[in-house]
Amino acid sequence: MKYILVTGGVISGIGKGIIASSVGTILKSCGLHVTAIKIDPYINIDAGTFSPYEHGEVFVLDDGGEVDLDLGNYERFLDIRLTRDNNLTTGKIYQSVINKERRGDYLGKTVQVVPHITDAIQEWVVKQAKVPVDDDGVEPQVCVIELGGTVGDIESMPFIEAFRQFQFKVKRENFCNIHVSLIPQPSATGEQKTKPTQNSVRELRGLGLSPDLIMCRCTTALETSVKEKISMFCHVAPEQVICVHDVSSIYRVPLLLEDQGVVGYLTRRLDMPIETRPRKMLTKWKEMSDRSDRLLEQCSIALVGKYTKFSDSYASVIKALEHSALAISHKLEVKYIDSASLEPSTLHEEPVKYHDAWQKLCSADGILVPGGFGVRGTEGKIHAIGWARKQKKPFLGVCLGMQLAVCEFARNTLGWKDANSTEFDPESKHPVVIDMPEHNPGQMGGTMRLGKRRTIFKTNSSVLRKLYGDAEYVEERHRHRFEVNPELKSHFEEKGFRFVGQDVEGERMEVIELDDHPYFVGVQYHPEFTSRPIKPSPPYLGLLLAAAGKLPSYLQKGCRMSPRDTYSDRSGSSTPDSEISELKLPSISNE
């Protein structure tokens, strides 16, 4: 097993996640099996209880693990399926060590950070690196480990110490360190400054880790003199200094690393058995990024949510929209709308904000209401959904978005004026959304309906079923505490509001569709978590097709794109040696 540790310096949020994913991608394109581990030094056991403003969205895995959004990047870039143990936090490590101590596993010893915590970290990494993540079930050969935060943080010290010991345990040829650092360019002089990087590398070396590659994040390409300066002061050869400047799309990052000989260096440094065959898979990334740069037609989607100030709050949703826009050759414009601004109370307090928000909503080609928690802004979302329903605007509601679509229909079509979710109004006479029996109200963490569950289509005429390639059932990831009240189902169906997808027992309403509407779909699950660049998520693809006016012809052709919309046959597939034929975009055709 080869281990590649990615650390970061100077600032957090410098792009370690994308760089770790890209390194994995170029190694995977050489035919290696790659897995990834994200270490977060915070004390939370998992990311499930965070506000999206803290670390961005909470990503959900097949096994129901609520993890950092970087694991979403790994899954999308490497096309793998991870588990909750691929996200390691200080909380998890301490919890496991304390449990051992209570059981008496340490036999009267004093339990300390070194060696007990550091040993636990190393054991976890070794064990998790062996877990297969590809569909073929083969044990990975390379493990990319991303250490969150910044070198020098107090909270990440035990991890750095663990890897200092680890590099000797696994031998030098099986471990290397990539350090991602910032090269600021103050606008006053326009000069690229290396001092922050020098300091951060000095700090890392002082802690016993010596970087093999220094990846410099900068706005424009690194000048040769700057590269040589970093090489001289940071104790590496010039070819070990890699420039990762800002690019038009994140799909270009693997190509950028490949162009600078990262594969060649890692092959020599880690003594890896890589054939130097032409790498088909990177052709696909090149085509994808070239295509996204060439797009002319635009399609705008209004994203009506409550965390719109920070785009990472909806990272996977935006990615799923981008994948779908790319599939139909449109440039995506996302209009972020704070749902509270659409509410009548805003009209009195801040009329300008209110009219701006409605102007954005009315001018969008499609409307998306994503998941969320809490009562703030829900009335605004209901107004947006009502507008989409009456104006026949394409609409997709995800999780809470679907539940609010049910509330909106109940209020305005069925005439139940107080219809609501018991999450927001426990006293409502028409509780159309109720909490699930298995939900435990005492504990917040990990008590929702989480992870991959099966949804069965109840009808053949469903638009979403056709978009899924006429599947009888789909397996998607869930994260919710509340569900549509199954007892009131018949009232809705009489009025053309259909529950076309239900869970295996037929008790949970999973998919809604509205008759006589170009595209009005709600899903209880989160389809964005399984969207891939080459394989967009069907509910999102449907939204973009409808917004671009292409949905009827697409369904008529049996869910196939016209040839100019697909990728060429030259591009390889993302798993080693699998068929090229799988690549025709989108792969939800009826083959």
Image (spheres, rainbow, N blue to C red):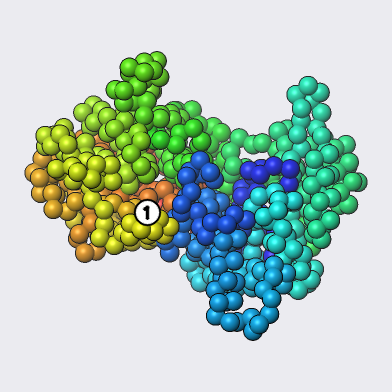
**Amino acid type at image mark 1:** Arg
**How many numbered markers are drawn?**
1
Q: Is mark 1 on a helix, strand or loop?
A: strand
* Residue located beneath label 1 in the image: 479
Q: Determine crowd level at label 1: few under 14, some 14-19, many 20+ residues with C-alpha closer than 10 A.
A: many
Q: In front: 210, or 106?
A: 106
Instruction: Identify the image quadrant of the N terminus.
Output: bottom right
Q: Residue at x 19, y 43 (%)?
A: 427
For residue 495, say whether it is visible. Answer: yes
**Above or below for 304 versus 586:** above
Residue extending furthest toward the bottom: 107
Residue 424 locus on image (x, y percent): 28, 42
Residue at 80 percent across and 43 percent down: it is 197
**Relative horizontal placement of residue 519, taking residue 450 as reference (left or right):** left
Residue 173 seen: no
Tell whether 322 sits left or right of 102.
left
Question: In percent of the image, x 68 and y 80: which residue is there?
Answer: 109
